[in-house]
Amino acid sequence: MHYISTRGGISPITFKDAVMMGLASDGGLLLPQSYPVITREQLESWRGLSYPELAFEVISRFVDDIPTGDLKSLINRSYATFTHPDVTPVVKHNGVYILELFHGVTLAFKDVALQFLGNLFEYILAERKQTLNIIGATSGDTGSAAIHGVRGKKGISIFILHPHGKTSAVQAMQMTSVTDANVHNIAVRGTFDDCQDMVKELFGDLVFKEKYSLGAVNSINWARVLAQVVYYFYAWLRVTDEKTIPVSFSVPTGNFGDIFAGYVAKRMGLPVDKLLLATNENNILTRFINAADYSLGGVVSTVSPSMDIQIASNFERYLYHLFAGNTDRLKEAFAELKEHGRISCTPDEMILVRNDFCSASVDQASTLQTIRDFYAETGYLLDPHTAVGVKAALDLLPTDSARVCLATAHPAKFSETVEQSLGFQVPLPESVNELYGKPTRCEIMDADIDKIREFFIAHIG
Ligand SMILES: *Cc1c(COP(=O)(O)O)cnc(C)c1O
């Protein structure tokens, strides 16, 4: 299996090279040249598999440059850190299935991908006798999952910038309580955008990037998408038996990474009826699906902050497929976005979009109400991101289908909002209680690119 760029500017590369390249060197995103197709018979034969066994079946079909034993060991180690024996269990409440993706170390679904990516990086770097310095900006979830994915790993240092005092308390502690020598937390006196701008500037300096082997961990890495494809198969096998019922997935969406993984599963032949793309007030993708209106607005802050995004980076991967691999059409679309702040699609293209996706936007009041109602009816706590998806599913998906809602974070991770909605304190899992009083290490710095650069150079491995 080889990988190509959505912009058509690179010759096909292997899986390991795709992992190390991250963003394609022509500015596009990497995709497999084709998708392996899983027959119904094959799918049925997977019913008895454990999560890591299923992960191997799915992932190995995209990887032909890592020996079987090594790949199995990478996968097993990645999912051994999860606290639930099923890794991503499915529970049923109020007629909907909840796919719990929050049993990893940082209590959000990003652990599913970043535990695997951390192990992959370490494996490939050791083999190539290389080192990697990861730099990233985070509003909370990606940074904590990335830090826990690479802490203590040989050949890797990680520098994560977060806006000082602007993440949730749990998110900050999950980052700064990691005191391994290869982990560097920088709390920037500024906003998330300040952090992101400085990271972009460091990556934009190609000489600097090359000299210090800079790498990224944002959701544009193909290995992250690939790891997430697995739980669509896993959930499907849990909510069906041999007779066919329609299965739909509701996905709280920010960067389009998680839902793109569902689209990949569908392309591989998983019988998925609809992918429901659920957004908060930052609803450009909902406007696109429902009204063919992909026009940029401003970002607003909501109670589901990990979805407060305007430009969903992984959307480019989907557009590539929507345009049937026509890279000229894709480049045209991005030129239009740059010049006019929008992307226009034809009515025929929109028919294709709506074959696979439906969408709803859920506002703040409705999100908080859903947390309340769901708790009152079932006793089950939803985090605000998950609540967006659940509300959209209850409104849009037919009740005679299996409605699977992706639970992207544990309610304790956003306990401030859940408490605001319910009026009582959310019980904290042990891993969160343990954070209080742990020693922390964090550098508090001004949003000054020169100071950040100096700090980085002084602290690389
Ligand atoms: C990152 C994140 C999302 C959005 O996922 P995308 O892959 O960016 O669409 C949703 N919920 C939570 C809790 C997250 O951390």
Image (cartoon, helix red, strand yellow):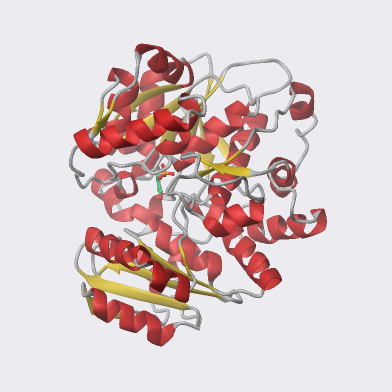
Vertical comparison of 420 with 186: above or below: above
Q: Residue at x 35, y 60 (%)?
A: 138
Q: Position of residue 356 (x, y in %)?
A: 48, 21
Residue visible at 42% across and 79% down?
Answer: 438
Question: Is residue 334 left or right of 5 when viewed as pictured?
Answer: left
Q: Is residue 115 left or right of residue 367?
A: right
Q: Position of residue 394 (x, y in %)?
A: 39, 23
Residue 436 seen in render: no
Residue in view at x 40 percent, y 57 percent: 141
Front one among 361 and 8: 8
Which corner quadrant of the image does residue 122 belong to?
bottom right
Against 66, residue 353 (above or below) is above
Give the vertical position of 389 relative to 11 (above or below). above
Q: Quadrant of residue 332?
A: top left
Query: How many numbered circles are shown?
Result: 0
Q: Is residue 196 left or right of residue 103?
A: left
- Asked if residue 445 is positioned above or below residue 398 in the image, the reply reads below
Q: Quadrant of residue 369?
A: top left
Q: Nearer the viewer, residue 461 or 389?
A: 461
Q: Nearer the viewer, residue 352 or 279?
A: 352
Compared across the picture, whether 148 is left or right of 269 comes to left
Rendering coords of residue 383 (x, y %): 38, 45
**Can residue 284 be seen here?**
yes
Quadrant holding the N terminus = top right
Which residue extends farthest bottom? 458
